[in-house]
Image: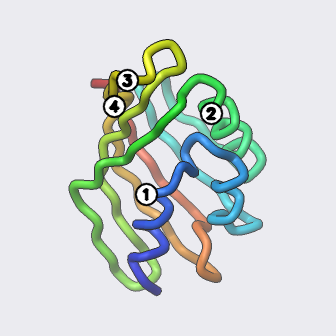
């Protein structure tokens, strides 16, 4: 497995575009997410819906990766997520910091364990 899949995912607009996101997700996708608002478990349909909702509020999304580590079919990514809003498309704002462990299966994101923190 190549880091390219994970890198391409974060370089794309998948985080704010459910159609792009759909191409990266395994049919049995699941994400455990610990955030400042608590723990969430999201399935494939729920994460696609979230990407669609984010796409309604943000015109641009950029993930700045500081660390990307590979161990077999598991990847650990540390990144900061920046967005540009519809109201202010010229200003890039930090949305949150993330640390996620991805398990890749059949060249798709299969299982994720994510922690996020607001700036």
Colour convention of the picture: rainbow
C-alpha distance separating marks 1 and 2: 15 Å
The tag on residue 11 is 1
Looking at marks 3 and 4 on the same chain, the residue that comes earlier in the sequence is marked by 3
Question: Residue beneath label 4, please?
Answer: 117
Residue designated by label 2:
55
Asked where in the image residue 49 lies, by quadrant, the reply is top right
Q: Nearer the viewer, mark 4 or mark 2?
A: 2
Mark 3 to mark 1 CA distance (whole Å): 19 Å
For residue 90, the mark is 3
Q: Dot 1: within a 10 Å radius of its alpha carbon, few (fewer than 14), some, or many (20 or more) residues?
A: some
How far across and down, in percent of the image, does residue 53 sit?
67, 30
Relative to residue 109, is residue 79 drawn left or right? left
- Please tell me how crowded label 2 is: few (under 14), some (14-19), or many (20+) other residues with Cα within 10 Å: many
Q: Earlier in the sequence, mark 4 or mark 2?
A: 2
In this rendering, the label closer to the viewer, 3 or 2: 3
Residue 93 falls left or right of residue 1: left
What is the quadrant of the C terminus in the image? top left
* Vertical arrangement, residue 48 with respect to residue 54, above or below: below
The residue sitting at 64% across, 45% down in the picture is 17
The residue positioned 66% from the left and 36% from the top of the image is 50
Outermost residue on the top side: it is 87
Q: CA distance from mark 4 to mark 1?
A: 21 Å
Q: Nearer the viewer's eye, disc 4 or disc 1?
A: 1
Q: Position of residue 60 (x, y in %)?
A: 48, 36
């Amino acid at each position: 497995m190549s880091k390219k899949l994970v890198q391409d995912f974060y370089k794309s607009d998948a985080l704010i575009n459910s159609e792009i996101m759909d191409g990266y997700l395994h049919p049995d996708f699941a994400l455990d997410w610990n955030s400042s608002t608590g723990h969430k478990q999201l399935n494939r349909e729920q994460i696609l819906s979230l990407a669609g909702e984010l796409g309604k509020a943000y015109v641009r999304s950029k993930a700045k990766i500081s660390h990307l580590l590979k161990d077999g079919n598991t990847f650990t990514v540390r990144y900061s997520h920046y967005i540009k809003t519809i109201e202010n498309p010229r200003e890039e704002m930090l949305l949150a910091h993330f640390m996620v462990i991805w398990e890749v299966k059949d060249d798709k994101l299969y299982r994720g364990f994510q922690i996020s923190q607001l700036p």
